[in-house]
Amino acid sequence: MLTKRKKTNEITKAQRHDTDTGSPEVQVAILTRRIEELSAHLDKNRKDKHSRRGLLGLVADRRRHLSYLEKTNKRAYGTLVRKLGLKK
């Protein structure tokens, strides 16, 4: 589970300005952290099908945010992908 402190850390790493909490960069960073934690959970609990379905939804949501960001701001997209270690 993503604690408030972890979420705040992800927001501060990806935000555009001091009060930014909803930009695509921030949302992708939060989703990436949730995906990492859920993947670790599923490595231990292979039969947890409900969490696996939730993981697929998070991945699809992140993909949508990334495609939007790529269309609107290619420079921010490239920076974010490098920062988070994502490859497309």
Image (spheres, rainbow, N blue to C red):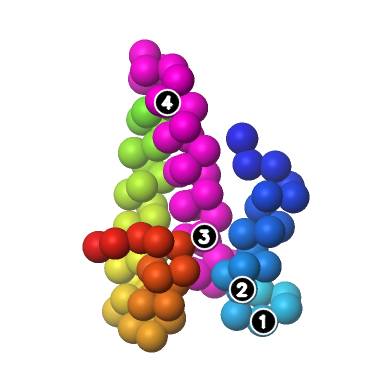
Return the residue nearer the eye: 17 or 80: 80
Q: Earlier in the sequence, mark 3 or mark 1?
A: 1
Residues at marks 2 and 1 touching, judged by CB atoms closer than 8 Å: yes
Looking at the rendered structure, the secondary structure element under dot 1 is loop
Q: CA distance from mark 2 to mark 1?
A: 6 Å
Residue range highlighted in magenta? 22-50
Quarter placement of the C terminus: bottom left
What is the three-letter code of the residue carrying label 4?
Leu
What is the three-letter code of the residue carrying label 2?
Gln
The residue positioned 43% from the left and 35% from the top of the image is 39
What is the three-letter code of the residue carrying label 1?
His
Looking at the rendered structure, the secondary structure element under dot 2 is loop
Q: Nearer the viewer, mark 1 or mark 4?
A: 4
Residue 14: image location, x then y, percent: 57, 70
Q: CA distance from mark 3 to mark 1?
A: 15 Å
Please name the residue that numbered disc 1 is placed on. Answer: 17
Residue 69, above or below 62: below
Quarter occupied by residue 9: bottom right
Please name the residue that numbered disc 4 is placed on. Answer: 42
Quarter occupied by residue 86: bottom left
Looking at the rendered structure, the secondary structure element under dot 4 is helix
Q: Is residue 37 magenta?
A: yes
Q: Earlier in the sequence, mark 3 or mark 2?
A: 2
Looking at the rendered structure, the secondary structure element under dot 3 is helix
Please name the residue that numbered disc 3 is placed on. Answer: 29
Quarter placement of the N terminus: top right
Q: Earlier in the sequence, mark 4 or mark 2?
A: 2
- Please identify the dominant SS of the magenta region: helix
Residues at marks 4 and 2 touching, judged by CB atoms closer than 8 Å: no
